[in-house]
């Protein structure tokens, strides 16, 4: 499994390759080329790493016009009121620890990591936030996370952790993932 920065670098490479394939040598088309990124859950953190971390995807950053995320834990994941610990590597859960997130998002503080840190205009970043924790019950493990995340969540990500500071947002009665 690639790390968040590795996945973000690969996303940046894909964006640059796409520009090159679509625009070829047309200087005007290359200058006007922009992408809109749409991401679910950890994919939103990969997009943020691309846009915020100065060591990742340098050429691709300027090619991103807008970002849309759904069910992304922009301020980490909490279970029973506690941020997931850094040592919890099962299912890459440690990617949602605020101190780990601050590292790959190139933020100075890990108290709140839902800030774009000046790496991207929050007005061009949209967060769709799920509010139906009851539908997130595909397996016993997910049922447990639904209970630990609590009612004010999409079953995994708490509503208060699912948006970027200063970015537009909307709320929908949907779970993190599942049959609906």
Image (spheres, grey):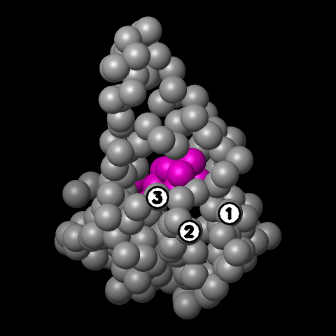
Residue placed furthest toward the front: 28
Front-lying residue, 82 or 29: 29
Look at mark 3 in the image and give the residue it sits on: 120
> Can residue 92 be found in the magenta stretch?
no
Q: Tell which residue pokes out farthest to the top in this image.
A: 25
Rounded to the nearest angstrom, the CA distance separating label 3 from label 2 is: 8 Å
Local packing at callout 3 (Cα closer than 10 Å; few below 14, some 14-19, many 20+) is: some
Q: Residue at x 44, y 37 (%)?
A: 63
159 left or right of 98 in image? left
What numbered label is drawn on residue 55? none
Q: Quadrant of residue 68?
A: bottom left
Main SS of residues in magenta? helix
Residue depicted at 55% across the width and 90% down the height: 81
The reply to whether residue 109 is in sight is yes
Q: Residue at x 57, y 75 (%)?
A: 113
Examine the structure image and report whether residue 48 is included in the region drawn in magenta: yes
Q: Of helix, strand and loop, which one carries label 3?
A: loop
Dot 1 corresponds to which residue?
106
Say above or below: 53 vs 136.
above
Question: Between 84 and 10, which is closer to the camera in this rendering?
Answer: 10
Q: Nearer the viewer, mark 1 or mark 3?
A: 3
Relative to residue 61, is residue 58 drawn left or right? right
> Pointer 1: residues within 10 angstroms few (<14), some, or many (20+)?
some
Magenta-colored span = 40-51
Q: Is residue 102 left or right of residue 42?
A: right
Q: Residue at x 51, y 26 (%)?
A: 16
Residue denoted by label 2: 117
Front residue of 179/139: it is 179
> Element type at marker 1?
loop
Q: Which element carries disc 2, helix, strand or loop?
A: loop
- Give how far across and how far down residue 151 sits, in percent: 35, 86
């Amino acid at each position: 499994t690639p790390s968040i920065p590795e996945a973000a670098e690969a996303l940046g490479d894909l964006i640059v390759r796409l520009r090159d394939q679509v625009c070829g040598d047309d200087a005007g088309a290359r200058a006007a080329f922009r992408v809109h990124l749409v991401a679910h859950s950890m994919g939103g953190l990969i997009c943020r790493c691309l846009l915020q971390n100065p060591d990742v995807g340098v050429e691709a950053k300027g090619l991103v016009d807008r970002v849309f995320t759904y069910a992304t834990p922009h301020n980490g994941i909490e279970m029973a009121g506690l941020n997931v610990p850094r040592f919890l590597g099962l299912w890459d859960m440690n990617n949602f620890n605020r101190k780990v997130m601050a590292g790959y998002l190139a933020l100075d503080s890990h108290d709140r990591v839902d800030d774009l840190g000046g790496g991207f205009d929050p007005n061009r970043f949209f967060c769709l936030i799920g509010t139906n924790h009851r539908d997130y019950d595909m397996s016993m493990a997910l049922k447990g996370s639904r209970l630990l995340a609590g009612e004010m969540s999409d079953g995994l990500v708490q509503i208060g952790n699912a948006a970027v500071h200063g970015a537009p947002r909307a709320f929908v009665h949907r779970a993190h993932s599942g049959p609906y």
